[in-house]
Image: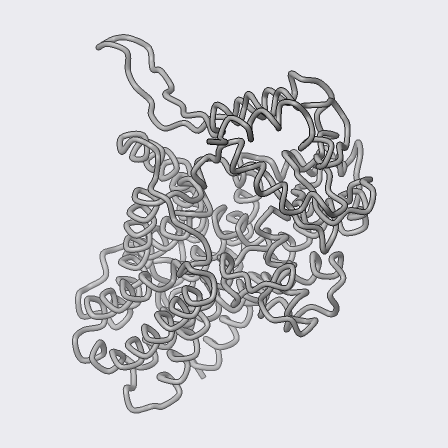
Amino acid sequence: MPTQISMTRNAIYLVTVAALLAVFAGLAILFGYISVDSWYYMLLTQALRSGHGCSLHGEYLAVYPCGYPTVLALTAPSTDPAALMISSKITNLILLAASFWLVLKASRNVFLAALVVLNPITLIIGMYTWSENLLLFCFCGIFFAISEIHRDDRQIAGYAWLAAFLFVGCFARYFFGPFAFILFVCAWIAYGRRTAWRIFPVFCGAGLVFLGYQAFNYLTTGFATGMPRVAAPEAPLLLIRQFLIALGINGLGAVICAVLLVGISFRRVSVAPMPVHDTQRPAALFITLAGLGFLALAFILRFRTLFDPYNTRTIGYGIALTVAGLVGLWVREMPREARRGPAIATLIAMMACAGFSLAYADNGALVQSIEDSFQEYKFPAGSLAMLKGQTPPADAMVFFKTPVPDLGGANVDNIEEIYYGKGVTLLTPRQGPDNAPETPLEFLHRVADVASKRCYFDFTPFATRDDFQAYLGATTLIDHKLLGIAGPWKNVERANLNPDMGLYLDSIFQPKKLVPCREILYQPQSRQVVTKKLP
């Protein structure tokens, strides 16, 4: 009888969490939440559904791992971009609801499970079409599998689940490879040496799969992750400062959620350190250690190489897991006979967490979008035609900025592949910090290779020279120095474009015009660049 009651209670928790997640999925559908990365995941999904594998423009693309696009391809009703936008949000809803259920089954602690999912970090990431959602699902599945093996190491199902979640994780994000090693160490500490040795062969197999995937990428593209990884250009103290700021902003939201969840349910919970030999302690300890390991790994990777800055997306899950794990080590539901207060209190607490997250996430941008929609609103999935440029048919395009039309407050980015259409060869000046800035001569050599086709320089996004010079003058913050003991702070920035490239582009600029590449190459400024390099 107690087991049946527990199953019923857990089912109610799942339905409540799924309903709250559905609200956020609905808002994501209404307001887009499509970033540049989201578009590439959907383009890969289209290629997979069309039988072209993980490719873009007919070439294998390894920059974005193939796991998440594969999941989207399996759940999408069609390859239509509008359908993909909507179905991706439903897929994220399923992944997050399943993540909650897996953590609840593994930890047997509803507060821990709820905080993994119902916090500003997980919910805002869940609104975007991002592979982080699959990463979290794989982590929760690994957690569930290890806990099952720890309870009964003779059952085969636990090992099968562990292998499956590790395998999918290898193709979810490149971050997963080193993170899986951290998870094994966390399992050794939390669950003990016996369980760690039991799961060791499975983790070794996953390591071989991940290394094999990296080797395939290297042989195919020349890089293990499909692109060169450059060293972080920022000063170490600046990176540490940015990490601490992101940690504080995101950590505050997760902590407030924890206070709301426990505070509203206070008459039904026990708050005390969990005894060392408590059967639920290993699960909570594992989550805590995994969160700290996530933060450490994210900090080190960004400290050494350049990619997205420290923010909700890059370090958020580490914060959410750490806070959830710490709550799990201190908070649990009282025995049934000792509980006081209405049983619905925990459900109300979950709703409070979701409501706070809606207001706090993304610096309140979601609330602002809702308010703005009463003045002007355009359904993103029905307005995709506005993302396409009004340029003539072209084989190649030299672009500098991709216009983002006003979609009535929708959170939708644009990318060149959408704006200029499929099959167009796209060129843009290589610039820092992602690449070594190229010289005008190197740039013109690339343009010359496609100039015989229908090729254009697109200056149409720039109405004036001042607009174009703002693009030319873009910089990257690399340090933040204090001038004197009591002086002001000074930003130290580095130009993204090669200085000569900036001067050359400024000399050929034509406001709001689409200029044929051949015309650009025959201009005196271009010929001067070439003749300067002749012996």
- Residue nearest the viewer, comparing 326 with 413: 413
Left or right of 146 on screen, residue 59:
right
- Residue nearest the viewer, comparing 327 with 26: 26
* Total residue callouts: 0
Residue at 45% across / 84% down in the picture?
A: 1
Left or right of 392 on screen, residue 55:
left
Residue at 78% across / 35% down in the picture?
A: 374
Left or right of 408 on screen, residue 69:
left
* Colour style of the rendered protein structure: one colour
- Residue nearest the viewer, comparing 299 with 196: 299
Q: Residue furthest front?
A: 535
Q: Quadrant of residue 491?
A: top left
Residue at 44% across / 65% down in the picture?
A: 217
Up the image or down, 376 lies above or below 420; here it is above
Q: Quadrant of residue 181?
A: bottom left
Report x, y in % for residue 507.
63, 20
Up the image or down, 260 lies above or below 336; here it is above
Report x, y in % for residue 95.
54, 66
Report x, y in % for residue 309.
42, 40
Left or right of 226 on screen, residue 51:
right
- Residue nearest the viewer, comparing 148 with 299: 299
Report x, y in % for residue 409.
71, 36
Up the image or down, 3 lies above or below 307; here it is below
Q: Quadrant of residue 44?
A: bottom right
Note whether residue 184 is visible.
yes
Note whether residue 19 is visible.
no
